Amino acid sequence: MENTNHHNQHDEVHISSYRDHWRTLLTLLLLTLVTIVISVFGANLKALSVATALLIATVKVVVVAYYFMHLKYDKKLYTWLVLLVAILFAAFTILTATEYFNR
Amino acid sequence: MEHTSGFVLPNSGHSRDDEASKLGMWLFLFTELLLFGGLFIVYMVYRMLNHESFLLSSFELNVGLGSFNTVVLLVSSMTIAMAITAVQKGEQQKAVRLLVTTLALSFVFLVVKYFEWSAKIHHGLFPGMDYYNGLPKGESLFFFLYFIMTGLHALHIIIGAVIIAVVIARTRKGLVNKDKYALAENAGLYWHLVDLIWIYLFPLFYLIH
């Protein structure tokens, strides 16, 4: 009975390879480069730059959460919880912005 | 004997539950996200109210140093993720080396931040200084938020560095190993969160011109 008491291990653990990690880093660095280039050299895209910068940042965050934070291979519960928090934060942001624009 | 078998009190003996500790870590990360989230909403509102001043002030920040620190954090996120891979594969030495690299990168980040802050303080831009007090409202708000948000983030880097140091010590002793690595995983999650927050701080303060 001794061992069945331990919930700990990881019945079918997914081990990310070193190469996967390199690939994730490369993706993140490329996205960073794109943001910097748009911001520094795209002065005439003024209106676009805020939205683009935030959009690219969000893509980077998703990549970090999905691969580095292992959401891709973990139980789906974690992904749902993260989405729930993201929706909660988006709701706060949208409510605040709406209030501001309707003054 | 027979009728007692199969009846085990939850959490009795030396059972441990790695899944539960990971879930606990995630719940804690959510509170952190909402803490910074609140500050991001404050930033959004003040930016909408002081559009021009925020634009003007953002040019004061050094895009080169900010970009450099972004790369440092991204690389450190990779090295800690690799350290977990190494632990899972039983490559203890490699894991320790990767963790030490992560720790070193956290110091690099803090040193760069120190020079950035010193330059700003030298110019009198720290809240309460004479030059700061004479700034137009919008610009002083920008620097107030800059110091609060990057300061709180730097505090998280320091806490993360301490946690990584603990993981290094325990990995060297073999207390973190391929059968027991929840501590390393949770430290990794915390470190990635610190990276995530910087991913938003960087464009919001340095890049949005």
Image: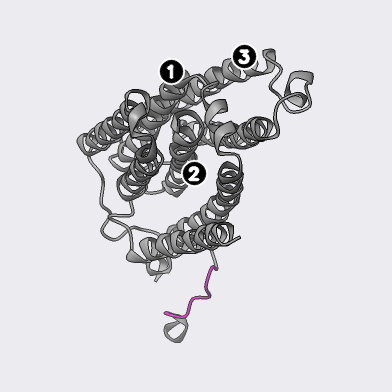
Residue receiving disc 2 = B190
Q: Earlier in the sequence, mark 2 or mark 3?
A: 3
**Residue B119: mark in rendering:** 3
State which region is magenta.
B6-11
Q: Name the residue nearer the viewer: B125 or B12.
A: B125
Q: In the visual, does B43 lie left or right of A84? A: right
Q: Nearer the viewer, mark 2 or mark 3?
A: 3
Q: In the visual, does A39 lie left or right of B190? A: left
Q: Chain of mark 3?
A: B
Q: Earlier in the sequence, mark 2 or mark 1?
A: 1
Q: Is residue B70 above or below residue B174?
A: above
Inspect the image, locate mark 1, and give the three-letter code of the amino acid beneath it. Answer: Gly
Q: Are marks 2 and 1 on the same chain?
A: yes
Q: Name the residue nearer the viewer: A44 or B46.
A: A44
Q: Can residue B93 be seen here?
A: no
Q: How far is mark 1 from mark 3, CA to CA? A: 14 Å
**Residue B64: mark in rendering:** 1
Q: In the visual, does B207 lie left or right of B136? A: left
Mark 3 residue element: helix
Q: Can residue B131 be seen here?
A: yes
Quarter of the picture holding the N terminus of chain B? bottom left
